[in-house]
C-alpha cells in the first residue's frame, strides 16, 4: 500500500550533449536516463521517505529495467508497473537552447507507456492512498492512457483521496484546443493544481496572471501552487497566500524541476507539514534538482533537502 500514488508514463530520456545541438544531423547524445514526469515525481516522493507507488507500463527491455531498478532501489512500490510484450519502453529526446528553451521528440503514445488502460487500474490500490497525482502530458498521450487516468481519478474522488494535478503542457503532444478540451475536466476534479506561471495563464483562459489566478481560485477549495523557475514559487489557498524566493544554485539541467518540486510538496503534506513549510521544502527540492544532469538524477534525498532547507531559512533570519 502506498500513501502517494501516481499513474502515467515511464520513459527514458536521451539528451543532446551540447546546447543548441539540433536533431536534424548526427551528434553526440547523453543517456539513457530514467524519466517520465510521473516517474520523476514518484521517485522524489520515495526519496522524501514517504510510501510511494506508480501505475504504469514499460517494455520488456533494458530501458524498462533501468527504470524499474532505479524506482525499486529508491523504495517506490513497483508492483503496479506492467511489462508489455510487443512494445518498447517510451523515449523522450531533448535538446536545449541558449535562451533556456527546450525541444522534445517524444515516443510514448505508441510505446509501452501509451498502452496502459483502465483494466490496469486496481481500485483497492487507489482507495487506500492519500494522494493521487496526475500529470497533464500523460492525459494527452493516448486514449487508453487517458481512460486509465480517468478511472483512477474517479476512484480517488469517490474515496476522498486528494487529487493533485500538474498541467505540464507539452505543445509537442497536443495543440491548444485539444489541450483545453482535455484539461478542463481534470482542472475541475483537482484538489491541488501545481502549475508553471505560463501554464497558469494559458489554462485559466485569461491573458494575464492575476486574472488567471482569480479565475482558477474560484473553484471552491482548490489549492493553487505557482512554480516560477529561478524566481521561486507561490501558493494560493482560500485566504492564504505565500511566496518563497528562490534558493541560489548553479543550474545545470532544468528538466524535472517541476516534478521534483511536486513530489517534495505532496510528500511534505503527506507527512503532516503545514502549507508554508511544504512550499519551502518543495522550493528547495526544485532548486536541488536543477543542479544535476538528467531529469530524475536531480531528485534529492530527504536529508539533503532538509539540510539545505534549514540553511536557506536560517540565512534569512
Ligand atoms: P518542468 O516542466 O521542467 O518539470 P516546471 O516549469 O514545472 O518544470 P519550474 O518552475 O522550472 O517547474 O521549477 C519548479 C521549481 O523549482 C521552481 O518553482 C523553483 O522553486 C525551483 N527552481 C527551478 N529552477 C530553479 C533555479 N534555477 N534556481 C532555484 N530554484 C529553481
Image: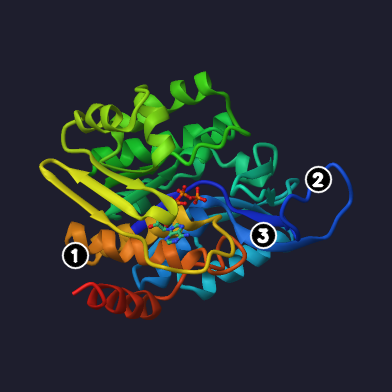
Crowd class of label 3 (few under 14; some 14 to 19; many from 20; radius 10 Å): many
Q: Quadrant of the N terminus?
A: bottom left
Single out the mark in the foreground, 3 or 1: 1
Instruction: Work out how far the residue at label 3 is from the one at label 1, CA to CA, in angstroms.
Output: 33 Å
Question: Is the residue marked by circle 1 packed among few (<14), some (14-19), or many (20+) residues within 10 Å?
Answer: few
Q: Residue furthest right?
A: 26
Q: Which residue is mark 1?
A: 272
- Viewport quadrant of the C terminus: bottom left
Bin the neighbour count of mark 2 within 10 Å (Cα to Cα): few under 14, some 14-19, many 20 and up: some
Q: Which secondary structure, mark 1?
A: loop
Looking at the image, is mark 2 or mark 3 nearer the viewer? Answer: 2
The residue wearing badge 2 is: 23
Mark 1 or mark 2: whose residue is earlier in sequence: 2
Residue 70: % across, % down: 58, 70
Q: Please name whichever residue, 25 or 155, is drawn nearer the observer in this view of the structure.
A: 25
Give above or below for 303 relative to 260: below
Q: Earlier in the sequence, mark 2 or mark 3?
A: 2
Question: Label 3's element?
Answer: helix
Amino acid at each position: 500500500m502506498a500513501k502517494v500514488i501516481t499513474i502515467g508514463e515511464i520513459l527514458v530520456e536521451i539528451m543532446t550533449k551540447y546546447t543548441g545541438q539540433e536533431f536534424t544531423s548526427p551528434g553526440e547524445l547523453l543517456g539513457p536516463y530514467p524519466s517520465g514526469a510521473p516517474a520523476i515525481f514518484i521517485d522524489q516522493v520515495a526519496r522524501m521517505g514517504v510510501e510511494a507507488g506508480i501505475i504504469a507500463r514499460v517494455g520488456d527491455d533494458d530501458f524498462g529495467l533501468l527504470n524499474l531498478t532505479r524506482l525499486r532501489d529508491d523504495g517506490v512500490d513497483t508492483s503496479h508497473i506492467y511489462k508489455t510484450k510487443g512494445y518498447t519502453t517510451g523515449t523522450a529526446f531533448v535538446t536545449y537552447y541558449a535562451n533556456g528553451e527546450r525541444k522534445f521528440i517524444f515516443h510514448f503514445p505508441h510505446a509501452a507507456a501509451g498502452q496502459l488502460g483502465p483494466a490496469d487500474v486496481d481500485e483497492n490500490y487507489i482507495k487506500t492512498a492519500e494522494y493521487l497525482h496526475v500529470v497533464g502530458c500523460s492525459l494527452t498521450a493516448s486514449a487508453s492512457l487517458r481512460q486509465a487516468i480517468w478511472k483512477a481519478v474517479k476512484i480517488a474522488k469517490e474515496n476522498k483521496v486528494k487529487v493533485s494535478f500538474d498541467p505540464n503542457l507539452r505543445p509537442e503532444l497536443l495543440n491548444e484546443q485539444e489541450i483545453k478540451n482535455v484539461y478542463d475536466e481534470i482542472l475541475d476534479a483537482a484538489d491541488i493544481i501545481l502549475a508553471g506561471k505560463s501554464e497558469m495563464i494559458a489554462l485559466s483562459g485569461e491573458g494575464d496572471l492575476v486574472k488567471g489566478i482569480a479565475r482558477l481560485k474560484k473553484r471552491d477549495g482548490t489549492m493553487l501552487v505557482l512554480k516560477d523557475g529561478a524566481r521561486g514559487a507561490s501558493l494560493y489557498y482560500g485566504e492564504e497566500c505565500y511566496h518563497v524566493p528562490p534558493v541560489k544554485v548553479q543550474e545545470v539541467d532544468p528538466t524535472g524541476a517541476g516534478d521534483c518540486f511536486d513530489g517534495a510538496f505532496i510528500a511534505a503534506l503527506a507527512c503532516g507539514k503545514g502549507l508554508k513549510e511544504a512550499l519551502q521544502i518543495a522550493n528547495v527540492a526544485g532548486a536541488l534538482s536543477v543542479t544535476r544532469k538528467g531529469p530524475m538524477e536531480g531528485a534529492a534525498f530527504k536529508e539533503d533537502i532538509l539540510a539545505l532547507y534549514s540553511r536557506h531559512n536560517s540565512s534569512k533570519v
